[in-house]
Amino acid sequence: MAKRIDLHMHSLFSDGELLPSELARRALKLNHEVIAITDHVDWSNVDTIPAIQDAIDDINANWDITVVLGAEVTHAPCESIDGIAKKAKELGAEIVVVHGETLNEPVTPGTNRAAVESKHVDILGHPGLITREEAEIALKNNIYLEISARNGHCLGNGHVANIAREVGNKLLVNTDTHSPDNIITFEKSYQIAQGAGLTHEEAMKALVDNPRELLKNKGIL
């Protein structure tokens, strides 16, 4: 059975329900190879990113799973996204996600554009009705687009998949986990990829090849 990689998850250090250790343990039991803990940040709390580094180091030293320190820039003014992402990287975040213009939250218009123009962002999470121009900028800046397993955020998955196919963007399938029931198996994530309209080959790239490429480029795998 293939191992799962999920690069968008939350602990109780933002609005998740689980400690980093329990999040990692539950993911390990569902055959995850790598998870990224990407708690929500803006300028009010970005300095707290290193708070879970000791827990991550402890998990990585003792369990057969790799936990990556990350951050998700969330509902910040468009003008602030690049600066917050840069600061997050300086504080140790290896994966920076931006909370994209999902269809079920009042995300400020222009957030997708600000995210894909940043040199410090790795993933545009649940980007809703992303435009072709935004997708082209994301491709140029090597920013991955997310197919989301999360209720509500998944409403734009089909559109994201179609735009990515036209433009050539690299996709990831992430859960945006906040609670134990959000953590899913590889098989379930494959079904979500299929539900977004991905072919078998496209789904396997989004589930296996693309996340591994991102992690290898960062020296994590």
Image (cartoon, grey):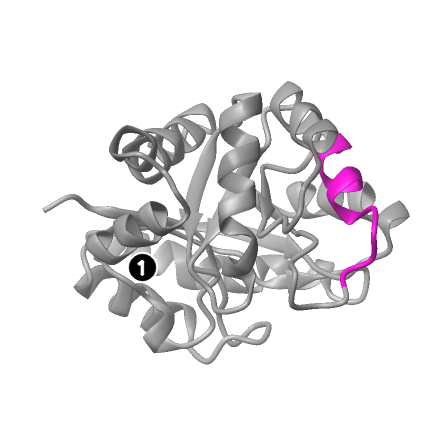
Q: Is residue 72 visible?
A: yes
What amino acid is found at the position of numbered circle 1 in the picture?
Answer: Ile
- Image position, residue 180 (x, y; %): 34, 76
- Image position, residue 69 (x, y; %): 50, 51
Indicate whether 3 appears above or below 11: above
Q: Which residues are magenta?
A: 107-118
Q: Is residue 94 visible?
A: no
Q: Residue at x 74, y 28 (%)?
A: 133
The residue nearer to you, when weighing 68 against 174, is 174
- Image position, residue 150 (x, y; %): 47, 65
Q: Residue at x 69, y 61 (%)?
A: 41
Q: Is residue 212 magenta?
A: no
- Image position, residue 5 (x, y; %): 32, 46
The residue nearer to you, when weighing 18 against 182, is 182
Q: Residue at x 48, y 61 (%)?
A: 176
Farthest residue in the left direction? 1
Q: Quadrant of residue 14?
A: bottom right
Q: Which residue is mark 1?
A: 59
Farthest residue in the bottom direction? 17
Number of residues whose C-alpha sits closer than 10 Å to that of mark 1, classed few (under 14), some (14–19) or many (20 or more): some
Q: Residue at x 44, y 66 (%)?
A: 177
Q: Quadrant of the C terminus?
A: top left
Report whether 12 appears left or right of 24. right
Label total for image: 1
Helix, strand or loop status at disc 1: helix
Q: Is residue 110 magenta?
A: yes
Indicate whether 165 appears above or below 98: above
Indicate whether 85 appears above or below 38: above
